[in-house]
Image: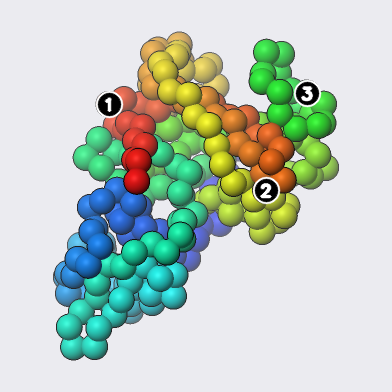
Amino acid sequence: MVPHEPTALPLYRQIGELLVREIDAGRLLEGERLDPERDMAAQLGTSVGTLRKALAFLEREGLLERRQGSGNYVRHRSGRDGVYAFFRIERLSGGGAPGAEILSVERCAKPAGAPQFGSAAHAHRIRRLRRLDGIPAVAEEIWLDGSYAETLTPDDLGESLYLAYKERLDLWIMRAEDRVSVAPAPAWVPPAFGVRPDAMCGHVERISWSQTGARAEWSQSWFDPAVARYVQRIK
């Protein structure tokens, strides 16, 4: 199947979610005053108008306090999670704006040896290449239990699978368990991925649970250790 670039989040949302990741990472601290808007816009390579839309979005989400004549200040998260809250891969230098390229979507029998998840005999297998700041970093293979949709196409998905699940399938991923190790890259990784097939790289196996407590999804991710690392922060 030809790689498919899903419809991206609006630019102001991309910038907003990038700032959410910076807050999560502790690089933007509670009470910290952000740089002047013109300086921030220049740093992010966007217009002041787009940046202001991103900041207004963060203010609505309870992550930012805008003080007239003083500036913009980081606030407590108030329980709000960004659309990339479950994406734990960051650039070696920290953070990085996520992007996703869908390589294929197929309905298949669940693979032999897979852990138990869902009630259907089949699952939707989604393969993606994830980028951080435009740099290929992660190859993903996600298996979503077939009971959630009879058919699933690249056009049904977006930059954030979990957001697409919520909006299109009435499925909320509420928690996940990750097991991090090293493993050889699979044969299907595209040439753009920095690790050749069968070469050792970082590996994350995940089981994800729905809002009903059911195991909804099983996935594997292979990440290029020369570009990215897995980060879990305890608060």
Q: Which mark is residue 226?
A: 1
Relative side of 158 to 181, left or right: right
Q: Amino acid at mark 3?
A: Ala
Q: Judge depth for marks 2 and 1 and give the one in front.
A: 2
Q: Looking at the image, which residue sits at the far bottom?
A: 69
Q: Quadrant of residue 138?
A: top left
Label 2 and label 3: CA atoms lie apart by: 24 Å
Q: Which residue is mark 2?
A: 211
- Nearest to N terminus: mark 2 or mark 3: 3
The crowd level at tag 2 (other Cα within 10 Å; few <14, some 14-19, many 20+) is few
Q: Are the residues at dot 2 and dot 1 in contact (C-beta closer than 8 Å)? A: no
Q: Position of residue 7 (x, y in %)?
A: 56, 57
| Residue toward you, 31 or 170 | 31
Q: Amino acid at mark 2?
A: Gln
- Nearest to N terminus: mark 3 or mark 1: 3
Identify the secondary structure beneath mark 1: loop
- Nearest to N terminus: mark 2 or mark 1: 2
Q: Amino acid at mark 1?
A: Ala
Identify the secondary structure beneath mark 2: loop
Q: Residue at x 24, y 72 (%)?
A: 73
Q: Residue at x 76, y 27 (%)?
A: 108
Q: Is residue 150 visible?
A: yes
Q: Looking at the image, which residue sits at the far front?
A: 235
Q: Which residue is mark 3?
A: 109
Identify the secondary structure beneath mark 3: strand
Which of the image's four quarters has the N terminus? Answer: top right
| Residue toward you, 167 or 131 | 167
| Residue toward you, 205 or 192 | 205
Relative side of 144 to 40, left or right: right
Q: Residue at x 29, y 48 (%)?
A: 25
Q: Are the residues at dot 2 and dot 3 in contact (C-beta closer than 8 Å)? A: no
